[in-house]
Image: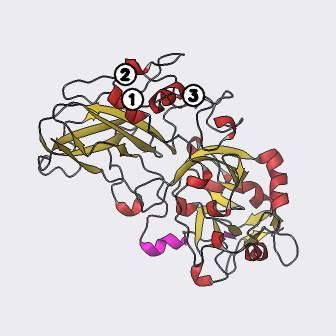
Amino acid sequence: MSGSEDFLGRHRQLSRRFFLGAGTAGAAAIAAGAGRVRADEIAPELAAAIGQLETFMTSPSKFRDVSRGKPLPHTLPPEKKTEVGLTRETWKLEVISDTGTNATRLKSPMKNEDGTALDFNGLLKLGETHSVRFAKVMTCLNIGCPLGTGIWEGVPMREIIWKTQPIENLRRVIYYGYHNDDDAQMFRSSLPIGRVFEDPYDLPPVILCYKLNGQWLSPERGGPVRVVVPEAYGFKSIKWLSHIVLSNMAAANDTYIDGNNDIESPLKTWAATLSIPKAVRANQPIPVTGYAQVGISGLAKVQTWICPKGAEPADDPYFLTAPWSDARILDPPAPGAWAGDLPDGRIPANTLGFTADGHPERWPMRLSKVHWAALLPGLPPGEYTFRCRTIDEKGQAQPMPRPFRKSGHAAIEEVSVGVE
């Protein structure tokens, strides 16, 4: 079985309507009922490109890594990890109040010194009745490529906080992980207590995560326990969690403030290419595939545009007047084809946002990524620039509504294409 046929078999609902038209981006997958789509029913150029797409979920070992620390905590020798609590057997979490005027009052703080800190078995015990799992793409605020997509599993942070019995003066939750016993390396983040106690806009809860794609969270991914904030960039989902500090502070004090970053920025919606020929023959169709990160504002469309190099509209920095054409968004994988080292390639039962038989409740899913495809019309010889963009569910075209780099990547990608 060829790569493209295998992909189409796993995506059994691929469209029979791959198309090519003057000025129109063709080619993609859409629901077409049960049964396979034969390879001879679609444009072969595009079938080959689709066949090379990565799986929807990312294997834990294949996530990109942007960890901080010297040395990186996950590279410490086993005996040091054991000593500092970076194993499931030795992990402990302190949940305490800050100090100062009008400090948060707790009846039952969790401390190492008196043996009340939460250990891994205690966390799993909470998980027996409170565990949740959800899909999320993990993305760094300041780079233009997702690190990976997976099913994250853990206990809502609020369940741990309520066990400390807060009384008053609680406005913010500050948290940080192991940082080589060096205060200068501390990497902390924070959230308003309202976001921790409630889940607005149908968001999943903020969790203390211990599994990824059904596997124990590895040290490389922030294990034994990390925070995962569903709608946020990666700096909010700190690794190697060791401390939660309940505070009466009215404002954030995240480490990322030091870099002039927008530390309350949720995930943006934007698109990029995965494959496009750098050199093609004249008047031959051009197959293109890509992905779109589906941010907090959702995804309505992916659009493409190719033009002669240097022929862009004048005084139009976001190319709003360009002749964009709709690409098509590929359907979700069939059950058993999600990959990412998930058992049997299937979505685990009781995953938020999925039906009992493992289908997404909405598509595209927010806070994840999807694939798209297009077959561009043939072009005369010359040098061209290809671009793609998203339109979110509010009708806003990338890079809007937040084009600023420090609130997350959203720039419109440019790819050079030579036609000979």
Q: Secondary structure at mark 1?
A: helix
Type of the residue with mark 1 = Ala
Q: Residues within 10 Å of mark 1 (few under 14, many from 20)?
A: many
Q: Residues within 10 Å of mark 3 (few under 14, many from 20)?
A: some
Asked if labels 2 and 1 touch by Cβ distance under 8 angstroms, the answer is yes
Residue under numbered circle 3: 334
Sequence-wise, which precedes: disc 3 or disc 2?
A: 2
Q: Secondary structure at mark 2?
A: loop
x and y percentages locating residue 34 in the rendered image? 54, 16
60 is higher (above) or lower (below) than 50: below
251 is higher (above) or lower (below) than 322: below
Which stretch is magenta?
Answer: 245-265
52 is higher (above) or lower (below) than 32: below
x and y percentages locating residue 391 in the rendered image? 35, 39
Q: Is residue 121 left or right of residue 179?
A: right
Residue under numbered circle 1: 47
Q: Can you tell which quarter of the image residue 169 is in? A: bottom right
Magenta stretch prevailing secondary structure: loop
> Which residue is more in the foreground, 43 or 290?
43
Type of the residue with mark 3 = Ala
Residue under numbered circle 2: 42
Q: What residue do we see at 52% from left, 40% from top? A: 55
